[in-house]
Amino acid sequence: MNPVVRTLLSRVGGYVGACLLVVFFALPLLWLVLTPFTPNPTYRASLSGVTLDNFRALVDNPQVWPSIRNSLVLAGGSALLVVALAALAAYALSRVRVPGRDQLLYALLLLSSIVTGTAAMVPLFLMLFQLGLIDRQVGVVLVLTGGLLPAAVFMLKDFVDSVPRSYEESARVFGAKPNQVLRHVVLPVIRPGMATVGVWALVQVWGNFLVPYVLLANPSKQPAAVVMYTFYDAGGQPDFALISTFALVYSVPVVLLYLVVNRRYGFAFQGGIKG
Amino acid sequence: MATVELTDLVTQYPNGVRGVDGVDLAIADGEFFALLGPSGCGKTTLLRTLAGLEGATEGRVRIGERDVTALEPGERDVAMVFQDYALFPHMTVSENIAYPLRIQKVARGEREERARESADPLSLGALLERRPAQLSGGQQQRVALARAIACHPQVFLFDEPLSNLDARLRLEARTFLKQLQRRLGVTTVFVTHDQAEALAMSDRMAVMEAGRIRQVGTPREVFQRPASLFVANFIGATPMNLLEGAVRGGRIDLGGVSVPLPAGHSGLGDGERVVWGVRPEYVATAGDGVPADEVVEGEVSAVENLGVTVLVTVAVGGRDGEEGVEVRAVLPEDDEPEVGARLRLHPQTARVLLYRADDDGALVEP
Amino acid sequence: MPSTSPAAERDVAGLGRARALGFVAPALVVIGVFLVFPAVWTLYLGLLDYSLTGAGAQAPTFVGLGNYTEALGDPAFTRSLGLTLVYVGGSAVLGQNVLGFALAWRLRGAGKVVRSGLTVLVLLAWILPGSVVAFLWQALLDRRGGTLNALLGTTDQAWVLDHPMWVIVVFNIWRGTAFSMLLYTAALSSVPRSHLEVARMSGASGWQQLRDVVLPTVRRHVLTNTLLITLWTFNDFSPYLLTGGGPNGASEILPVYVYREAIIGGHLGYGSAISLLLLLANLVIAVFYLRVLRGRTEAT
């Protein structure tokens, strides 16, 4: 074949392929972007004018803000707990010789990737039931924290390992007591790592559907991820104005947080435990 | 200001390795003292034991009148400059310098005042509000120094303070550090693996190997009379000539060539094996007046340019199928010979040292 | 030289062994109670005839391997297992893997606009919350007013009901390709330029470069990626939000099956037995994965 024609064909083929991919990935997203602003929204993604009326449904619905607040409570609570416990553990594991440390970490990491919300659904449900933690947000926070902790400890230990020990030694030579070393030197230095792990945990919990869905029965305690699902499963005509605006408001924080973390640290921190 | 005294000091790691293995050392008040040795010789461990970062397994550490062996690092009244400087990245230069004072609960205003006082002589005055990451390597080193100075300790401990600087800056910093120490007059112990640095900067130095001190002395003593083969090998910019041979008829037979026995060694028995050593700097070309029995003659096998001097390697002996020896000499640039030329060398007999040809390789005293 | 090896293990902050254990303990307790214990309990529960209601709730009896034999004999279970394999194989092992690699490969040469535009779209599909994404697909595929039917001009085409497995497979490819794309982009950037240049100067075509230079270099990344996405897809519950496992169990993959049996149906013992099978499958995948990872760190 004529090389010019071949180059042309492959270039055209490349563009067609790229267009198809753009359509494939963009099509489902259209609804999220357009519907909140279109008058009389339906299933069909279209923009027949621009209006902010749909957001009134968001304001009027009594379930919206409690569910967002619940999401904040669950995600914030889990993130704080994960960061606090993981930072303590990671620091001690990094700086003090504990026999069998590496094996322990690997075992925990392995465990956290196999004991998913899906696979441990039954015992978790039963255990919280018997502890009296079923239908309580603290139960969900603890379960999610347990699942996220091994990976969080792993990531943070990596981070602490990269902090030169001479910082702490230097502070000690100048007379700092252990708690001063921690407060003045260690905490400020590992703060970026803690922030990253915190955001990571926040995003993981914010989007989690299954765990709160199984462990919380009372709709007033459920987070946005679950409440959103009840909006369209409630039978009858779904409230498109409500769902579209709700989905948008609920999604924006995740996207923003992701952008922040991604800009600063690359994508290495994603992954981990899903479901 | 204070003396430092180490008695029978042993520092053993949990894995049983003895980083410091029985060290006795007395450092005088105001002295600039170097701990020199190859990596893994225990010099850094010794410094860290002095600082209290490692606990002494046996023995005592005294600073001034106090026995500090059991004290925490912060209670010993010492300041340390780390190899990587250990400047806290989240604090400004000023906060870094004042950190020891913050621990001592000095009021903020006075802290800033004293940080400035320590910073100005080191030309850091304009950088006080910067973060360590915004400074060059040389500036970081000076901040670390200023921080050590700010707490007015009795002893400075420097762990390889110059090793993170590039070659040119290192020479400048060497001079600067020496002047600074002289001006402050604070007893200073510094660790280095660079023999030139130790020779250039210290008032006295200790050469360490395998956790033990092999020699203590002024740079001149250590350079001119290394106490063992190990020290002889380690000290000096060009490797010392060290040739094994045997005493024979009042001379030393090095295999293919014989050299005079230095004065004061007539007590050595015939056939005794020794190592004959002389620095290349103390080997010259033999002029006409040199007695023939002091001349070593051979063929030039390599010439290396050292700037104003040349290092010449001469293959000596080795005829009649016998294995020869190599003798190196540092000659003035004007005397540079051709490779392959025959050259007559004259090792200054007064500078020749003899060592035992055993594992310890101790200096044979006249 | 700093004495790194022994000093690295030293307690540089003067923390002390006791306080260090105190630091680690809270994390270990939470992990132990909410992660380790449930896993162990699953083992025991799977041997019981335990249910939320009825006789099994009052006094669960020991049925040994009964739950397992029951599961293996239950056509709903075997069908669910088969569907799971189709789902994992089609959407993760083939779909995400191939599409992710293709995207990473093609986008490195693409213009900035195409590259960043497509990357953002692919990433959005990945980072949006599952509930939102599920509804977006509901809207896309709806029988009457869905965007897809409107675009194709097909009316009353009930995608979710007629082709449930196709829907969740395509959905998961859409949802998860980002990870593979990111991983392969990183992997491809580690292929030395000079190797590709040598291949090009030898006259290798694009396909030959891929086969002879790129694939051998990124082989381990392919393995890592495949195992990770397999693990995640295997435990993925989000198809439930799209099809609810239906119609009539036609898209009931194992996680949905466990949910329906145990939580909805209340057969906790039976559900535990299936959960244990899931755990075991996870374990096999994860152990394999760690083996590969360890092999890689030792090799380098």
Image (spheres, coloured by chain):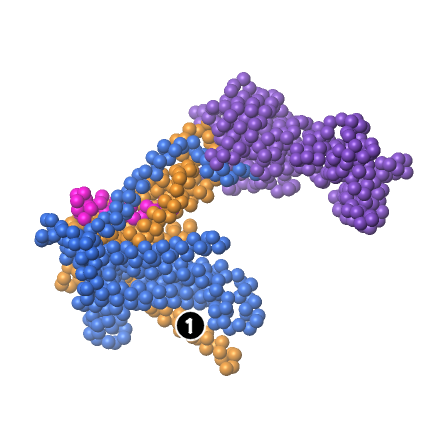
Residue at horizontal 23 percent and vertical 69 percent from the top: C164
Q: Range of the magenta residues?
A: A126-154
Chain letter, purple in picture: B
Taking A45 as reference, is B329 above or below it? above
Q: Left of C115 or right of it: where is C157?
A: left
Q: Quadrant of the C terminus of chain B?
A: top right
Given the image, on which type of amino acid does mark 1 rest?
A: Tyr
Element carrying mark 1 = helix
Chain letter, blue in picture: C
Q: Quadrant location of residue C274? A: bottom left
In the orientation shown, which residue stands out farthest toward the right? B288
Residue A211 x/y as whole percent: 23, 52
Taking C10 as reference, is C34 above or below it? below
Instruction: Between residue C116 and residue B77, name the one nearer to us.
Output: B77
Instruction: Between residue A102 and residue A52, name the one nearer to us.
Output: A102
Is residue A139 covered in magenta? yes
Q: Left of A45 or right of it: where is A217?
A: left
Residue at horizontal 62 percent and vertical 28 percent from the top: B33
Is residue B89 covered in magenta? no
Residue at horizontal 26 percent and vertical 49 percent from the top: C39
Q: Quadrant of the N terminus of chain B?
A: top right
Residue at horizontal 9 percent and vertical 52 percent from the top: C55
Chain letter, orange in picture: A
Q: Main secondary structure of the magenta part?
A: helix
Q: Left of B223 or right of it: where is B80?
A: left
Q: Left of C202 or right of it: where is A132?
A: left
Residue B151 x/y as whole percent: 51, 26
Q: Residues within 10 Å of mark 1 (few under 14, many from 20)?
A: some
Residue C108 x/y as whole percent: 46, 64
Q: Which residue is mark 1?
A: A15
